[in-house]
């Protein structure tokens, strides 16, 4: 028996449950089947995300200095977690809606087309009201796919400023410096300032001209040896400008 034959067998068995006394049983069976399918898909997705995070962390631990590759690994971890959150929401809502209509059809012989046709005005009202929801979902997907923000980033969304705690299907959650949790609809995000994506790692050490502080000198040597930053001595720089 191939896969198509097995699927037809399942369909025939479900059709056999559509007797009047088994309608509710068929409805419950489809709902449970949808829940199991959702659990399996979300579980597989979480395994993939966990594998990505473990691999990136292992590479991060093996790298002692904060190199460009290390920063890329951290970004990969953030993006994987954000994508996991988005996909979990999409899987849940898609299976819930499709499973409900399939359950109505196989359980009570209610056609989704008939439902929409018999409630044209209601469908139009719901469709008009769902425009904002669709906008939120699409904008959220674009934000994640274009890697504009990720979980753990410090961002300024105009409406709120803080650290990203989650990026959902409709809402992005931030935590401000004072601990306030902000829920910003994805469709309302018109601009994003991501403070975590800056590439400037230069450090300016100020010391008086002719009398360099011993502490500043030690700090400069430490940073130069570690390769973490570019050092600029403001006092010497000013003296060089005057000489020129």
Image: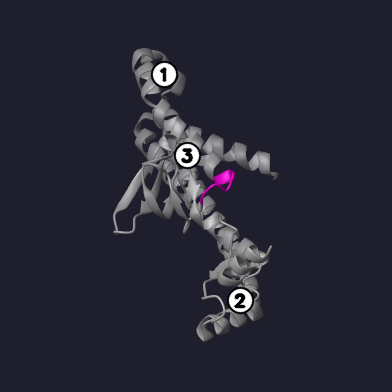
Secondary structure beneath dot 2 equals: helix
Residue bearing mark 1:
116
Above or below, 87 relative to 102:
below
Q: Quadrant of the C terminus?
A: bottom right
Cα separation, mark 1 vs mark 2, equals 55 Å
Q: Quadrant of the N terminus?
A: top right
Instruction: Please identify the dominant SS of the magenta region.
Output: loop
Q: Give the magenta range.
A: 144-149
Residue bearing mark 2:
61
Identify the mark nearer the N-term, 2 or 3: 2
> Residue 100 is drawn in which quadrant?
top left
Q: Nearer the viewer, residue 211 or 103?
A: 211
Residue drawn at the location 63% of the way across and 61% of the way down: 72
Q: Are marks 2 and 3 in contact (CB under 8 Å)?
A: no
- Residue 113, position as x, y percentages in the image: 46, 19
Q: Nearer the viewer, residue 199 or 173?
A: 199
Q: In the rendered image, is residue 42 in sight?
A: no
Residue drawn at the location 60% of the way across and 77% of the way down: 223
| Numbered mark located on residue 76 in the image | none
Residue drawn at the location 38% of the way across and 19% of the way down: 123
- Residue 43, position as x, y percentages in the image: 52, 57
- Horizontal side of 73 relative to 127 (left or right) equals right
Q: Nearer the viewer, residue 159 or 122?
A: 159
> Residue 96 is drawn in which quadrant?
top left
Secondary structure beneath dot 1 equals: helix
Residue bearing mark 3:
191
- Residue 7, position as x, y percentages in the image: 61, 40
């Amino acid at each position: 028996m191939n896969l198509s034959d097995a699927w037809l067998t399942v369909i025939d068995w479900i059709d056999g449950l559509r007797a009047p006394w088994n309608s509710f049983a068929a409805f419950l069976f489809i709902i449970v089947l949808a829940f199991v399918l959702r659990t399996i898909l979300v579980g597989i997705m979480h395994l993939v995300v966990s594998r990505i995070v473990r691999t990136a962390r292992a590479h991060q631990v093996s790298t002692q200095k904060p190199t460009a590759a290390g920063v890329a690994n951290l970004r990969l971890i953030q993006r994987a977690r954000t994508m996991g959150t988005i996909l979990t929401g999409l899987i849940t809502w898609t299976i819930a809606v499709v499973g409900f209509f399939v359950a109505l059809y196989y359980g009570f012989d209610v056609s989704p087309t008939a439902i929409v046709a018999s409630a044209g005005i209601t469908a139009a009202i719901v469709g008009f009201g769902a425009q904002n929801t669709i906008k939120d979902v699409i904008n959220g997907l674009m934000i994640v796919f274009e890697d504009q923000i990720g979980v753990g980033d410090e961002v300024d969304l105009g409406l709120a400023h803080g650290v990203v705690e989650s990026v959902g299907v409709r809402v992005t959650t931030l935590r401000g410096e004072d601990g306030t949790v902000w829920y910003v609809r994805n469709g309302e995000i018109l601009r994003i300032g991501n403070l975590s994506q800056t590439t400037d790692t230069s450090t300016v050490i100020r010391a008086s001209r002719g009398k360099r502080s011993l502490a500043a000198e030690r700090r400069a040597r430490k940073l130069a040896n570690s390769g973490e930053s570019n050092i600029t001595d403001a006092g010497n720089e000013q003296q060089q400008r005057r000489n020129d």
